[in-house]
Image (cartoon, coloured by chain):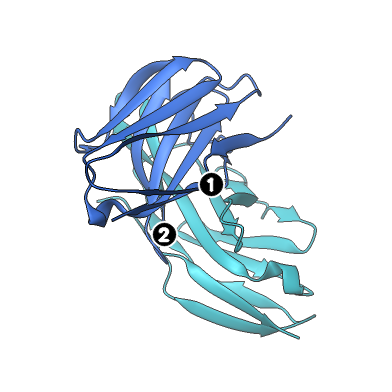
Amino acid sequence: AQTVTQSQPEMSVQEAETVTLSCTYDTSESDYYLFWYKQPPSRQMILVIRQEAYKQQNATENRFSVNFQKAAKSFSLKISDSQLGDAAMYFCACPMNYGGATNKLIFGTGTLLAVQP
Amino acid sequence: DTEVTQTPKHLVMGMTNKKSLKCEQHMGHRAMYWYKQKAKKPPELMFVYSYEKLSINESVPSRFSPECPNSSLLNLHLHALQPEDSALYLCASSQKPGAVTNEKLFFGSGTQLSVL
């Protein structure tokens, strides 16, 4: 079965510090992206970063970066210089083949990140 | 315009009511999605429309009836709901159907539904 696992239900970080959120996945897709989405109290899901599985280089978007270990099927998110606005639920997501050319996105269980001033 | 707009933001309905949720995007996206999200849980896919045709129905009860009248608009018609259907309903869109392996989903802010 194709799964996405986030083993940390809650995390806390001090403002300006660095935090890493973990994610492991399993997919039968051969060419795919992995995604981290953020859901703040406004409830809107916002894409934080995505990583193409065929790229060796880890993706970076400003203070957000990933550590992608394809063999281990691990895709962690590092947030540097944490800010109060980073407080949110973070979901890791991975595509799953639904049948034929149709795919759907599977979300992990989420990690609730608190940022302490 | 990179927004997905959902209305209403909040909805309270009785089990005998009929109501509709609306979702709109003007990005030219040809895939639109309905997700259901319970508190502190990940979104669960309900329906996918590709080129205005229903392509995925995740065995959703018939009391939920989706409709895609045109490429910009997605509705979810609700009838005879149960209290356990209370949840946040999220709409999303993406540029190309079937390409969620590499495409970003754009989400709306959701409709918080309470069924009494």
The answer for which chain carries disc 1 is B
Q: Which mark is residue A75?
A: none
A5 sits left or right of A100 in the view? right
For the residues bearing labels 2 and 1, Cβ distance under 8 angstroms: no
Residue B33, image x, y percentages: 44, 33
Q: From the viewer's perspective, is A34 left or right of A13? A: left
Name which quarter of the figure residue A65 lies in: bottom right
Q: Which residue is mark 1?
A: B9
* Residue type, numbered disc 2: Gly
Say which element carries label 1. loop
Q: Colour of chain B?
A: blue
Q: Secondary structure at mark 2?
A: loop
Residue B51 can be seen, yes or no: no
Chain coloured cyan in this rendering = A
Residue linked to disc 2: A108
C-alpha distance separating marks 2 and 1: 25 Å
* Residue A21 spot, x, y in % from top left: 56, 71
Q: Position of residue A86 (x, y in %)?
A: 69, 68
B17 left or right of A96? Answer: left
10 Å neighbourhood of mark 1: few (<14), some, or many (≥20)? some
